[in-house]
Image: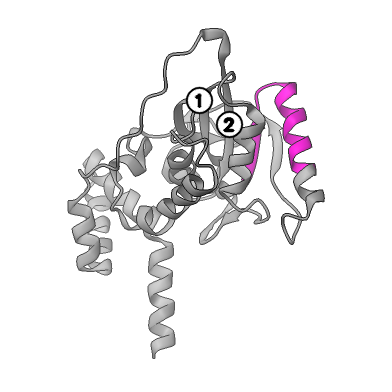
Amino acid sequence: FFGSKKRLYSSSLLNCKRKYTTFMSGLLSGSTFKTVLGVGVISLFGGSFIAAAFRMGTSASRIPEEPASNEQDIEFMTVGGGCFWCTEGVFARVKGVHSVIPGYTGGKIRNPTYDMVSGGYTGHAEVIQVKYDKTRVSFKKLLEVFFKTHDPTQRNRQGHDVGTQYRSAIFYHNEEQRTIAEEVREELDKSGAYKTPIVTVISKLEEFYPAEDYHKKYYENNPNQPYCQAVVKPKIDKFMKVFSDLAK
């Protein structure tokens, strides 16, 4: 009995992110079906989920703004390391980073939506595009943060988030980034830092599609949402501990 209850709870928790987002999407778009579905999910999770939903307006501690940079010092990095709520929450706290935009890339159709991508049918990965000042933080250092705040040995998943949309990937903007990314990946593989080989895919960035507005600054706007508490916050806490010198 307890084993089956545990499996049921685990299964429900694993689907929390997508179902909760569907609920929010329904509220924002006025879709009756999605809203009803979302209400059902809230009922499934009980009082704690309802309490979290009503705290949606609560924000996380404010992240200091990055000082202005010279235009010639600005560069971009695009990576996928599982759920973009997680990667956005981490990289928004890195010194030298001006902005982090969640989005989709690496797929086969134009203008994908979250529902399409999360279904795993378009080939896109959930990614973030990081705008940073190269004089304050290097591309290589950002890759170090990237590799240490997700598991690059998991193929097409991160933890309980499963599917090609959650693949570990680096989408380089130029040949210099490609070279650095390949060197860093090779060095990590040879170092024995991981028990199994790194499966991070390195490919050229073709087209980046920004995600829907409600995904932007998701953790900052919804720190008490169950998925944020269970999955996003531990990754941010790990970054703040391991990279305290890089934290804003």
Which of 55 and 42 lies nearest the eye of the viewer? 55
| Residue 38 placement, left or right of 175 | left
Helix, strand or loop at disc 1? loop
Give left or right: position of 97 versus 44.
right
Mark in the foreground, 2 or 1: 1
For the point 35% across and 41% down, the residue is 218
- Evaluate if marks 2 and 1 touch, with contact meaning CB atoms under 8 Å apart: no
Identify the magenta region. Answer: 167-186
Question: Which colour scheme appears in the figure?
Answer: one colour
Q: Position of residue 226 (x, y in %)?
A: 32, 58
Residue found at the very far right of the displayed protein: 190
**Residue 65 falls in image quadrant:** top left
Q: Which residue is mark 1?
A: 96
Tell me if mark 2 has few (under 14), some (14-19) or many (20+) residues whose alpha carbon lies within 10 angstroms of its own. Answer: many
| Number of numbered discs visible in the structure rendering | 2
The earlier-in-sequence mark between 2 and 1 is: 2
Q: Label 1: few (<14), some or many (≥20) within 10 Å? A: many
Q: Nearer the viewer, residue 75 or 124?
A: 75
The residue under label 2 is: 78
